[in-house]
Image (cartoon, helix red, strand yellow):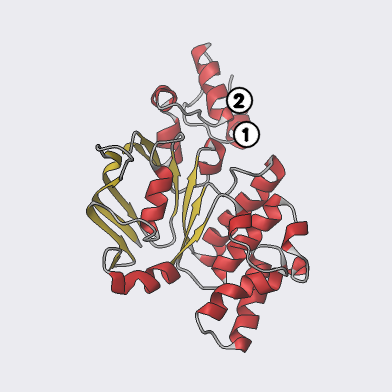
Amino acid sequence: MIKTENVSFRYPSQETEELFALHDINISIKKGEFVAVLGHNGSGKSTFAKLLNALLLPNFGVVYINGMETKDISNLWNIRQTAGMVFQNPDNQIVATVVEEDVAFGPENLGIPPLEIRKRVDESLIDVGMFEYRKHSPHLLSGGQKQRIAIAGILSMKPKCIILDEPTAMLDPSGRKEVIETIIKLNKEENITIVLITHYMDEAVNADKVYVMGDGKIALEGTPKQVFSKVKEIKELGLDVPQITELAQMLIDEGVDLPSDILTVQEMVVELCQLK
């Protein structure tokens, strides 16, 4: 679904020199995978997200979305239909004064017939758990509900992949939980490829694969268990590990016989119950 080959990108600076935001990125994401891309501010993860939607084009290397090269301008329309983008602030993506009209905006611009638009809008709102709010005004909704409306707007265009650039950064814990549950549901039940850009470690626990970025490069990659067991390396990159993983590491340091790749409360409970 997504493949990058030796991708590097730089923003033109206001001075004479240009600095690379991304260096030699090689990532491969299969159809139906849930991939989390982690990194602190300035690590290059949001730049990477924009390259996947052809909002930015690489200076060096190639980005393929479902076999289409992003540098080929004739692919632009199909790429953005294939890979939908959800941004950090849902208010920047909401364009209508009624929820169902906002969700219909995308397919209307694609020239979809009215009856099909009606069907897509209803299905998308049901998928994100917001159907009962279809007649509401978006500005009266909570942050988490707004972000789910933004996701529904992307879903209504039938993408094969959704790229989410820190979609929970502006939300409270309740809103974060709503959005992450929606993302997991879309991935598991609808087989939509998910690329989640985040700096919240707990959000990456359910991913199939995790990439950790630092200084514009891929610093770590693997399954959540493989990546989060490397507590020292992650902290050196300016990040935290999930709280349960950190607790497990503290207990291990005190001599408790536990695996270093515990990610969830349930796993911790099982391991503690098995101790003699």
Q: Give the amino acid type for the residue marked by disc 1 in the picture.
A: Val
Circle 2 or circle 1, nearest the eye? 1
Q: Give the amino acid type for the residue marked by disc 2 in the picture.
A: Leu
**Residue for point 76% across, 66% down:** 133
The residue labelled by disc 2 is: 272
Q: Residue 150 sits in which quadrant?
A: bottom right
Does residue 227 lie above or below 4 as drawn? above
Q: Residue furthest top?
A: 254
Q: Residue 32 sits in which quadrant?
A: bottom left
**Residue for point 57% across, 55% down:** 183
**Residue for point 51% across, 73% down:** 158
Does residue 70 lie above or below 178 as drawn? below
Residue 6 horizontal side relative to residue 84, left or right: left
User: Sequence order check: which comes first, mark 2 or mark 1?
Assistant: 1
Instruction: Say what secondary structure mark 2 lies in.
Output: helix
Name the residue nearer the viewer: 172 or 219.
172
**Residue 8 visible somewhere in the drawing:** yes
Instruction: Say what secondary structure mark 1 lies in.
Output: helix
Residue 222 horizontal side relative to residue 172, left or right: left
For the residues bearing labels 2 and 1, Cβ distance under 8 angstroms:
no
Task: Give percent across and percent down for residue 228.
Answer: 45, 32
Residue 151 horizontal side relative to residue 15, left or right: right
Task: Give percent across and percent down for residue 97.
Answer: 72, 68
Task: Give percent across and percent down for residue 76.
Answer: 35, 70
Residue 188 horizontal side relative to residue 214, left or right: right
**Residue 265's mark?**
1
Neighbours of disc 1 within 10 Å: few (<14), some (14-19), many (20+): few
Distance from disc 2 to disc 1, alpha carbons, whole Å, reads: 10 Å
Check the picture and name the quadrant holding the C terminus.
top right
